Image (cartoon, rainbow, N blue to C red):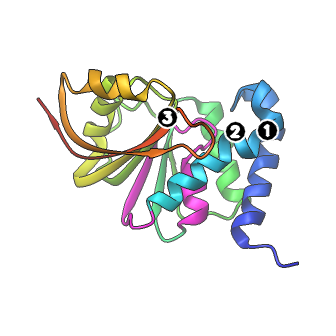
Amino acid sequence: MIVSRETESLEKYAELIRKWNPAINLVATSTLRDLKNRHIADCQELARLAASADGKWVDLGSGGGLPGLIVAIFRPELSVGLLESDKRKSSFLRNAARELNLQNVIVYTDRIEKIAPLLANSISARALAPLPLLLSYVDRHLALGGKAWLMKGRNWQSEVQAARADWNFEVISHPSATDPDAAILEISELRHV
């Protein structure tokens, strides 16, 4: 049986999360048993949806690398920046990138609102902040004409409505692969009101 490079990398990545999680809490302990379905599958879906993305990708608040490391695995031609303020999580991200042989990953250890604008063509975030606040982070780091790929839970529709008070944007909602009430939001043409 032939196993793809991506499948091997995902299996190794899951092992790394399980190994490091007790020390630095990369994902909720209760979800470790179902790591592939609970965390990795949606990130794979995001990588598939963003197949036309090019240039520089930045994952805000990367934590354990979801979805940033998954994007880097499936899109080796992209430059993928992982922005994480927690030094322990940044150490995990650097180690994972090295062990997975991901030459396209750069880890930034800094706060989203402090680091100089990263001017990314694409930005991702998962479980980071409510959409109105998250869009201010996206706006700071997104290049002109870029897109954001934001993974949101079951309150995504009310978050979109709340964000419209301060932001103009186009949004396409893609159903989550793992939760029928969640969505991946594809946001473009972001402008402050």
> As rendered, which of 181 and 142 lies closer to the eye?
181
Which quadrant would residue 155 be assigned to in this image?
Answer: top left
The quarter of the image holding the N terminus is bottom right
Name the mark on residue 34: 1
Q: Residues within 10 Å of mark 2 (few under 14, many from 20)?
A: some
Viewer can see residue 19? yes
Residue type, label 2: Arg
- The amino acid on which the numbered mark 1 sits, given as a three-letter code, is Asp
Residue stretch in magenta: 51-75
- What whole-number distance in Å separates the C-alpha atoms at marks 2 and 3? 18 Å
Q: Which mark is residue 79?
A: none
Task: Report, in whole angstroms, how far the alpha carbon at label 1 lies from the one at label 2.
Answer: 6 Å
Which residue corresponds to the image point at 52% horizontal and 61% vertical from the top-left? 48
Q: Which mark is residue 61?
A: 3
**Looking at the image, which residue sits at the far left?**
193
Q: Residue at x 79, y 25 (%)?
A: 30
Residue at screen point 21% across, 40% down: 169
Residue 23: tell me if it is visible. no
- Nearest the viewer among 129 and 56 is 129
What residue did someone put label 2 on? 38
Q: Quadrant of residue 141?
A: top left
* Residue 158 image point, x, y percent: 36, 22
- Picture coordinates of residue 11, whole percent (x, y): 79, 56
Dot 1 falls on a residue whose secondary structure is helix
Q: Find out whether the residues at labels 1 and 2 contact each other: C-beta distance under 8 Å.
A: yes
What residue is at 56 percent from the left and 37 percent from the top?
Answer: 180
